[in-house]
Amino acid sequence: MMSNNPDPLNENITGLEPGGGVPPGETPPGEGSMSGDQGHAEGSKAGKAVNTIWLVLIGIVVLLLILFIVGHIVGIFDLIF
């Protein structure tokens, strides 16, 4: 059973070729056209300094944990405590 298309203007849509294809130039661009500021600075020196500080702090914590684990395995803390 076939039903009729409820939109009588469906065959007259602008930009469609026979068979449903779209001619070149009728589709939107692939990228956005915004060329202004995105709200943050790329390569900011303050951002790099903060990242470096965090990496150093994380490195110190990891180093202390490794020393604690190795010291516990070796038995250094049995002599102190």
Image (cartoon, grey):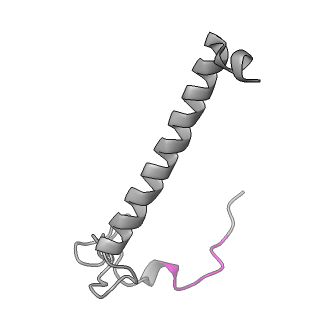
* Residue 30 sits above or below residue 56 on the image: below
Give the image location of residue 27, x and y in percent: 32, 75
Residue in view at x 43 percent, y 50 percent: 56
* Residue 54 sits above or below residue 25 on the image: above
Residue in view at x 52 percent, y 85 percent: 9
* Residue 8 sits above or below residue 60 on the image: below
Give the image location of residue 18, x and y in percent: 34, 69
Give the image location of residue 23, x and y in percent: 26, 72
Magenta part, dominant SS: loop
Taking depth in this image into account, of 12 and 65 the one nearest to the observer is 65
Q: Is residue 27 left or right of residue 7?
A: left
Considering the image in quadrants, where does the C terminus appear?
top right
Instruction: Residue at the far front: name it.
Output: 80
Taking depth in this image into account, of 54 and 23 the one nearest to the observer is 54
Residue in view at x 29 percent, y 78 percent: 26
Q: Is residue 55 left or right of residue 2?
A: left
Considering the image in quadrants, where does the N terminus appear?
bottom right
Q: Does residue 62 appear in the picture of this structure?
A: yes
Region rendered in magenta: 4-10
* Residue 74 sits above or below residue 61 on the image: above
